Structure formats: structure tokens, C-alpha cells
Image: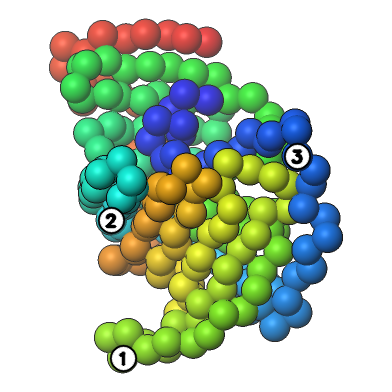
């Protein structure tokens, strides 16, 4: 789906596999790390709504790339509204609208059922963590908080080799994660503000053309 591939390249975790390589089945999950992730997922499932502000950074020293953006997302059930890097994505559980500011264009796409598809919902509620073998690295202290550092290795061969997450040990929430691509790029996300179970109107997930005056509508369904 074009929307999330453009907006969240690292969140998608490069879903395609390399047919020339074998699945990484020989790797084993660390029981301690898995227990921590299970707690994160269990708590996240209790959230009716999530509102988060985050920063995103792409770094590739070899190619001298260093880009950074800030963004925010609102999630209610399977619905979400995402703003980042000059784009707005609205998903109502059936259809995705993507507004691209630089082109003043709205792309409309239907959503196909795909268990492997990654959405902001799966990222923030921890569901997608089940697709990795976790390993507990250590604990660190930052700004008075104890963070548990866990490395995640994909169970199937991907274009990246590792995802590192930092989890607030007390609140059982992911505060940072970084995707290490095999091409030398690192995609880092840091959550600066995280609110749960706040009142969110369903109108947040309804596309209104009036909110994007003059934008070209490109229906790709």
C-alpha cells in the first residue's frame, strides 16, 4: 500500500522477504525479553484510544543522509489519523486517504486484508512485536526513567537485520525504536508524548475535502 510505504518506511519494517535466503528459524527468543514484551502488549490492549507525538530520523553515514521530521498520530480501534513529513493519512478501517502537501494531492486506496501488513495500530499496541525473536540487552536510565533495551530479530529474512526498542519499565510503553537496514540506514523513532484513553471523536477519521482546498483527488481504488 503506497500510503504507509511512503509515510512510514521504518514502521513497515520492509515487509518483503528475500527469496534467495532462508527464514531465520534457528534463532531463539529470550524468555526474559519475551515476558517484558508480553506485558507491553497486554497493557496496550487496554487502550481504547492513543494519541502520540513522535520524532523520526533517517541516518545513513555512507550516503551522507541525515533527515528528521516530527509527527503525530491518533488511533481509535483500527482507525487512525497520521501527520508526518508534509503528509496526512486518514484510515477508517476500510479506506485510506493520503494527502501529499507538496503535490496538493489526495490519494484514495482500498485496504486489502493482510496479516503481515503493519499499521500504526499494530505498532503502538505492540501486536507486531510477535513477528520477532527478542533478546534482552540491558537496562539504562534516561531522564529519571528506567528503560529496558531489547533487540528484535525478524523471524523471516528482511531488508533490515535488527530493530532495537527501549521500553519504559514502569509504564510498560515503548518510548523509542530504531530499525537497522542492511543498506546502512538507521530509521529511529522517539515518542515524546503518549496519551491513552482520551476522548476522540469519530469525525477525526472521516475525510473531508473541504479540509484540503484545491487538492487533486486521485481515486486509486
Residue 182: which disc?
none
Q: Residue at x 41, y 69 (%)?
A: 175
Callouts 3 and 2 close, C-beta under 8 Å: no
Residue in the picture at 34% in, 62% down: 190
The alpha-carbon separation of the residues under discs 1 and 3 comes to 43 Å
Q: Which mark is residue 21?
A: 3
Instruction: Decide which of tag 1 and tag 2 comes sooner along the chain.
Output: 2
The extreme front residue here reads 62
Residue plotted at (31% across, 41% down): 63
Q: How is the image coloured?
A: rainbow
Instruction: Please state the horizontal and vertical placement of residue 156, each as a whole percent of the image.
Output: 73, 47
Which residue corresponds to the image point at 37% horizontal and 89% vertical from the top-left?
Answer: 141
Q: Quadrant of residue 67?
A: top left
In the picture of the structure, the residue carrying the numbered disc 2 is 55
How far across and how far down the image is residue 189, in percent? Answer: 37, 57
Whether pointer 1 and pointer 3 mark residues with C-beta atoms closer than 8 Å, the reply is no
On the image, the x and y values in percent for residue 57 come to 30, 52
Q: Is residue 220 left or right of residue 201?
A: right
Circle 1 packing at 10 Å, graded few (<14), some (14-19), many (20+), is few
In the rendered view, would you say 193 is above or below 162?
below
Which numbered mark, 3 or 2, is in the foreground of this view?
Answer: 3
For the residue pair 126 and 33, the one nearer the viewer reads as: 33
Residue 210 appears left or right of 50: left
Q: Is residue 5 above or below residue 83?
A: above
Residue to which mark 1 is pinned: 144
Amino acid at each position: 500500500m503506497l500510503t504507509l510505504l511512503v509515510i512510514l518506511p521504518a514502521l513497515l519494517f520492509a515487509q518483503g522477504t528475500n527469496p534467495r535466503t532462508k527464514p531465520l528459524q534457528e534463532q531463539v527468543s529470550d524468555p526474559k525479553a519475551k515476558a517484558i514484551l508480553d506485558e507491553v502488549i497486554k497493557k496496550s490492549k487496554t487502550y481504547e484510544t492513543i494519541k502520540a507525538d513522535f520524532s523520526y530520523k533517517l541516518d545513513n553515514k555512507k550516503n551522507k543522509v541525515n533527515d528528521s521530521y516530527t509527527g503525530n498520530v491518533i488511533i481509535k480501534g483500527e482507525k487512525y489519523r497520521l501527520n508526518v513529513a508534509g503528509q496526512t493519512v486518514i484510515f477508517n478501517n476500510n479506506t485510506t486517504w493520503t494527502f501529499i502537501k507538496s503535490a496538493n494531492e489526495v490519494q484514495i486506496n482500498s485496504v486489502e486484508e493482510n496479516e503481515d501488513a503493519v499499521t500504526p495500530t499494530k505498532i503502538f499496541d505492540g501486536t507486531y512485536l510477535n513477528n520477532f525473536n527478542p533478546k534482552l540487552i540491558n537496562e539504562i536510565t534516561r531522564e529519571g526513567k528506567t528503560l529496558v533495551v531489547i533487540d528484535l530479530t525478524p523471524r523471516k529474512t528482511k531488508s533490515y537485520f535488527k530493530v532495537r526498542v527501549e521500553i519504559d519499565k514502569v509504564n510498560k510503553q515503548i518510548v523509542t525504536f530504531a530499525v537497522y537496514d542492511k543498506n546502512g540506514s538507521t530509521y529511529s523513532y522517539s515518542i515524546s508524548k503518549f496519551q491513552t484513553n482520551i476522548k476522540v471523536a469519530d469525525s477525526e477519521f472521516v475525510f473531508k475535502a473541504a479540509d484540503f482546498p484545491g487538492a487533486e483527488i486521485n481515486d486509486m481504488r
